Image (cartoon, grey):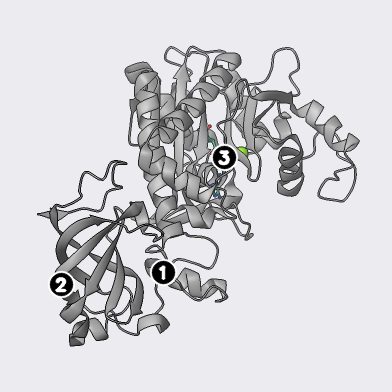
Amino acid sequence: QVVKLRPASKESDEKGTRVRVLGRVHRLRSQKDVIFVTLYDGYGFLQCVLTGTLTKTFDALTLTQETSMDIRGEMCEVPPKQHAPDNRELHADYFEVIGKAAGAEEAITTRVAPDADPQTFLDNRHLVIRGETASSVLKVRAAVLRAFRQAYVETRLTEVSPPCMVQTQVEGGATLFSFDYYGEQAYLTQSSQLYLETCLPSLGDVFCVAPSFRAEKSLTRRHLSEYTHIEAELDFITFDDLLNHLETVMCRVIDLVLADPEAAKAIQHLNPDFRAPQRPFLRMRYSDAIDWLREHDIPNEEGEPHKFGDDIAEAAERKMTDIINRPIFLTHFPVEIKAFYMQKERADPRVTESVDCLMPGVGEIVGGSMRIWDYEELLQAYKREGIDPASYYWYIDQRKYGTSPHGGYGLGLERFLAWLCNRWTVRECCLYPRFAGRCKP
Ligand code: 4AD
Ligand code: MG
């Protein structure tokens, strides 16, 4: 019986059973007449004990980390005072090397020398992901994706798959990746929002999980040039409905992830202090945030006190979230610093019905808004931004054929994970990060 090393149940129900495990050497410890091999197979870890003649073979004497093996034997409890993953071990009576790993400790394995240059880690990401930390993050990532899909099913959103090759910008021309599309100019999508909006009449509320692309020139720890964007769009809603939905979905996702034993264990390992956030999230208007930043002597990008109309830059935003230390819905940003499609607030048309969700340690992880739903107003907005509306005819048509108040948001999966798993950078939260200067492996 080949077994996958799923975390064992508390009662050692495997005790005494004969098993066969297939995996790679995670850790190796040789003593006189005993070799302890910790095998990993992507599901878990198992300590295997080789004794007697098994330790004398050429393969045993030349065993290296990362070598793939077939080991058979009997599951046993770990003797008192000894440690082994999940408190179990396999006493081997047979083993076979399947693929020897070259270079032993020198090989760039899961333990790429801790003081190695960051470029070395990035160049060897294909090996780094074998490590416990990187693979834990990837497991949490998979659980988060499952949880979002479940939370959306529960709130009756339908999943759609919009195109990545497009001819319109959503979040400003400065970060567009353009390419030649059979002789026409096209772009890699910055956001699927505009396409989601067009789905509302036929499908009701919708969501997608799709890559978004941004030609970000600056290297920061929270910007990628390709990231996974979880976006949702809701029809016939108010701005308050949007905020409530967002809070409900985020909290539900966290509950679902923490209820998943494998993900919960990984989060415990990566971020032992993690606590699910309390509802309601703090709601703060942009204008109040400006006052708050002035009161706390946190300057704007020019080094001056913040004033109405300023962008709240990454550093200031991060300081604010770290001091307040709980999720914040920052709302009602000025029209000038937000995208063309955002609905203005009725009571104060200088500002938009927009929201950024800020998390301690990361800052903005979600951006959303109500959308302009009046035809003339949308055309005005294009004019104000100097955008030629021609290529947006399909988006504008939405306002011609049965328009409706609607809104939505986009959440950066890697930023959500950086917060949940307490990672220094979003680069640790995706399989193969892409950012300025890096497109490999
Ligand atoms: O705030 P953004 O630019 O909003 C939009 O794209 C909207 N059209 C979304 C919508 O309403 N459907 O991006 C949304 C989120 C950000 O809050 C951030 O989490 C993430 O996408 N994001 C990035 N993540 C990693 N690298 C980048 N370069 C990112 N740019 C945005
Ligand atoms: Mg934003």
Q: Mark 1 points at which residue?
A: 110
Determine the residue positioned at 67% across, 20% down: 344
Locate the N terminus by quadrant.
bottom left
Classify 7 as above or below 61. above
Residue 331 appears in the rendering: yes
Classify 435 as above or below 276. below
Classify 29 as above or below 102. above
Pointer 1 local density, CA inside 10 Å: few below 14, some 14–19, many at least 20: many
The Cα atoms of the two marked residues, 1 and 2, are separated by 23 Å
In the displayed image of the protein, which residue is found farthest to the left? 1
Query: What amino acid does circle 3 point to?
Result: Phe
Q: Name the residue under label 2.
A: 95
Q: Earlier in the sequence, mark 1 or mark 3?
A: 1
* Circle number at residue 286: none
SS for dot 1: loop
Comparing labels 3 and 2, the label whose residue is closer to the camera: 2
- Ligand 1 neighbours mark 3 (CB distance < 8 Å): no
Are the two marked residues, 3 and 2, in contact with CB atoms closer than 8 angstroms?
A: no
The Cα atoms of the two marked residues, 1 and 3, are separated by 25 Å
Horizontal and vertical percent position of residue 363: 65, 42
Determine the residue positioned at 14% across, 57% down: 19
Horizontal and vertical percent position of residue 132: 42, 59
